Image: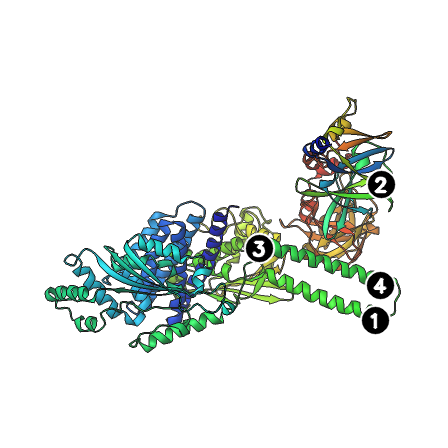
Amino acid sequence: MAETISRVATSEAKEFIAFHIGAQTFCIDIMAVREIRGWTPATPLPHAPTFVRGVINLRGAVLPVIDLATRLGLMQSEPTARHAVIVVQSAGQVVGLLVDAVSNILTLTQDAIQPTPEVASEIARTFVKGVVAAGDEMISVLTIQNLLPEPVLDAA
Amino acid sequence: MDPMAAIKQTFFQECEEQLVELESGLLRMEDGDDDLETVNAVFRAVHSIKGGAGAFGFDELVEFVHVFETTLDLIRSAKLAATPAVTKTLLRASDVLADLVRAAREDGSADAGAVKVIADELSALLGGAPRHGDDDGKVSVEALDFQPVCISLDSIFDIGEPEAPATQDFIVRFKPSAGLYAKANESLRLLRELGSLGEMSVECDISEIPQLTELDPEGAYLCWTIRLTTTASEAEVREVFEFVEWDCELSVETADVGKLLEALQESLEPHEAPEAPVAVAEPKQTSVAIDPAPASFAAPSDEHPAAAKAESAKGEGSGSVQATIRVDLDRVDRLINLVGELVINQAMLSQRVSEAGLSRASSVVIGLDELEQLTRDIQDSVMAIRAQPVKPVFQRMSRTVREVASMTGKAVRLVMDGETTEVDKTVIERLTDPLTHMIRNAVDHGIEKAEDRIAAGKPEEGSLRLSATHRSGRIVIEVADDGAGINRARVRQIAVSKGLIPAEANLTDDEIDNLIFLPGFSTASSVSNISGRGVGMDVVKRAIQALGGRISISSVPGRGSTFSMSLPLTLAVLDGMVVTVGGQTLVIPLTAIIETLQPKKESVHELGTGSRVIATRNTFTPLIDVGAVLLYRDEPIEPTSQVALLVESESGAKCALLVDAIQGQRQVVIKSLETNYGHVHGIAAATILGDGRVALILDVDAIVARPRADMIVAEMPAAAE
C-alpha cells in the first residue's frame, strides 16, 4: 500500500480537461487552461488561416479563437451558444479553443498515457501526444504548443 | 532582472531627473536668477549624481562631477560670481555630464576630449581658489558662511602635519537621522570603515531610545561617540561619511586639545597666521552638523543668520515639493486596461437597459447615468497618471539649440512656454526626435546669420520659441523662429528641379510652404552636418503622423516661420469613424480622413482591369474597396451604393476607401492584436465596442500603400497548414 502511494507521487499524477469534438474525445493539461466560457460570435480576421475563427473580447483583451475541429482536420460545425471556448495560455499568448463540449476532468499519471499509435494522419502525429484508455473510450492527449504556429501567421 | 541592475536602473532614472533639475536651475541662473535657493538646487542635483555614481563605481563620472560640484560650491559660497560666461560653461558642463551619465548607462564611453575641455574650463574657474582634494569643498558645503574658521584650521593641519605627531586623535560624534536608514545606509558599515582607519573605541548613546510603545520602528535613536586614533587626516575621516552627510549630525573634533595647541603653535611661528585668535577661540569646532530639517539644526552660536535663513529656505523648499511615488509603467497600463474594460462594460449595460425599454426616469436609468459620469471621471484620472509634462523634452531642446548655435556661429535664444503642459508618456518619448530635427532646422536654416539680422534691423540674437498648449483635446506644440521665413521662390525652384512639382504648377503660398514636407526635399544649398543629413521635414511629418498628429507651417517672409504640431493626448484611445463593411464593423482613424464623399456614377472611372478612380475637383484618386481588400466579400459591389472616405496616408498618398455605411464617430480604446495573435496586414489594432464585440481598426497606410500585386495574392485561399 505504501508502495503504491509513493509510486503515484513519483509518477506525478496530472489533471486533464477532457472535451468532445464530433465523435472524438480529447484532453489537455489543466495547468494550461485559464477558463472555460460559452461561444460568442467572433470578429473575423482578414487573411487569417481558416482555423482561426476570429477574435473575441475576453474582459478587455482581444482573444483569438481557434476552431479546434478545423485545426485537427475534423468536421466543422457552425458554432452555437452550446459550444465551449477553452481559454488556454501557451508560450505567453492566450488563445481560445472552440470545442463542442467539455466533458470531464481526468487525473492521469504519466504511466497511463500510451504513445500515439502509428497512424497515417499527419495532424494526429503533430498534435496528439499520446492516448489514454477510459473504459471503452479512447481519449487523445493534445499538445497545445503548435496550435497557433508563428510561420502560418507570417505566411497568411 | 538582478537586484543590482534594478537599483542601477533606478539610479539612472534619478539621474535623468536630476539632470533636468540641474539644467532648469542653470537656465534660471542664466536668466539672472542667482537666488541662493536656485544655486542650492543645482548643487543638490550634481551632488546626488555624484553620490550614486560613487556607489556604483563610475569613476570617470565621479571625477567629472567632483570638479563640477566644487565649482558650484564656489558659487554657492559666493566666492565665484555667476557671470553669464560662467553659467554658459556650467550649462555646457551639464551637457557633458548628461553624456557621461548616458555613457555609464550604456557601458560606452563619452567623448573624452569634450569632457577634458569642460573639466579644464571648470578647473580654470576654480582658479586660485584653494583646493585640497575633497575636504575643502565638503567642509565649506557644510559650514556655509562659517568656513573662514574651517579653512584656517584645515590649512593649519595641512601645514602642521609634517612636524606634528604621526597619529592624531579624533572624537567623532555621529548621529544618524531616520533618512539615513531609509536610503539603505548602515551605521555599522560606516563604523567599521572608520575602524579601518586606525584604533577606535566606540560609545553608543542610548539615552534617546523611547519606551517600546512609542518606538518608531523606522526611527533613528542611537548616537555614537567614536574616539579614533589614526594617521589619517580629518578629510579622510570625513570621507567615510561622505554619502550620508545630509542625513546625519556629524562632528569631527580633534581630541587632544593640548596636541592641537602644540600643532597650532608650531604652525603659527613660521607663518604668523592671522587666523590664530579665531582658531584658538574655537579650537575644536571644525564644522557644524547640518540636518536637512532646520528644526534639528545644531547651529553654533556664531552661525551667520544668512546661512540659517538659506537653510530654512531650503527646508521649506523641499517641504513644499509634492510627494510622488515611482510606479512601474506596466501597473499603470494594467489599470488603464481595466478602466477601459469598465467603460466598455458600462456602455454595454446602458445598451441593454435602453433595449429593455425602461423609462428615462426609472431609478435604474438614473443610477446608470451616474455610473457613466463616474466611469468617465475614473478614465480621465487614470489617463492623467500616464500624462507627463513636456518639460523634459523641451529642456533637451535647449541643449540642441546651444549645440547647433555654436556649430553655426549664430546667437540664438530659446524661449519656452507651457512646459508644464501634460501629454501621454508615450507621446513624449516619441516626440523627442522630430522636435530635435525641427529645432536643428530652425536654427540652421530659419535664423539668419548675425550680420544679416543686423542688416534686416533685427536684434543680433535670434529667438526661437517653443511652446505647448492644450487645444480641444489635443496638444499643440509650436516651434517659431524669428528668422527670414521661407524663401518661397527658392522652395518652388527646388521642388521643380527635383521633379516634385511640374514647372507650370500654380501653387498658393501655403502650398509652397508645405512642399518642404515632401520626401527628398532639402533647402540647404550646402549640406551641413547639422540638418542636411538627407532626411528632411518629411521624416518629421511621418513621425508626427505616426503619433496620430498633424503638422503644418506658416511663414511670413522676413518675420520667421512657425511649425505647428497637433498631437493626440494619448495613444491609448483614438478618435475613429465607425463604419460597416461587408457586415463587419471597422474603425478608421479620424486623423487620416480628409472628407467623406457619396460617389456618383459619373465621377467613378474604370482604369485598366478592375481598378477604378474617383474624380474629386478635377483630381483622380484611386478607389479601394475595403471589403474586397479585407476579403469580407468576393465580389466588388457597385461604388455608388457605398460611401467613399477620402484618406491621406502618412506618406501623403491619397486614396478613397469604399465602405458600406458610416455608423458614427467615437472615441475607442486601442487594444493590441499582437499580444495574443500577431500582426494582420491592413489592420492596425483592435478595439471593443459598446456591444462587447471586437472591432478592428484599419491601418490606413497599409491599405493605401498596398501594392496592386498584393491584392491578387490576397484573393488566393489562405494557407491552412
Tag 3's secondary structure? loop
Dot 4: within a 10 Å radius of its alpha carbon, few (fewer than 14), some, or many (20 or more) residues? some
State the CA–CA distance, disc 4 to disc 3: 38 Å
Q: Which mark is residue B363?
A: 1
Q: Is residue B506 visible?
A: no
Residue that numbered label 4 is attached to: B353
Q: Amino acid at mark 3?
A: Asp
- The mark nearer the N terminus, 4 or 1, is 4
Q: Which mark is residue B328?
A: 3
Q: Is residue B636 visible?
A: yes
The quadrant the C terminus of chain B occupies is top right
Q: Position of residue B46 (x, y in %)?
A: 39, 60
State the CA–CA distance, disc 1 to disc 3: 40 Å
Q: Vertical placement of B561 versus B309: above or below? A: above
Numbered disc in front, either 4 or 3:
3
* Total tally of numbered discs in the picture: 4
Q: Position of residue B240 (x, y in %)?
A: 33, 57
- The mark nearer the N terminus, 1 or 3, is 3
Q: Amino acid at mark 4?
A: Val
Q: Amino acid at mark 2?
A: Ala
Chain of residue at mark 1: B
Tag 4's secondary structure? helix
Both labels 2 and 4 in a single chain = no
Residue that numbered label 2 is attached to: A101
State the CA–CA distance, disc 2 to disc 1: 40 Å
Dot 2: within a 10 Å radius of its alpha carbon, few (fewer than 14), some, or many (20 or more) residues? some
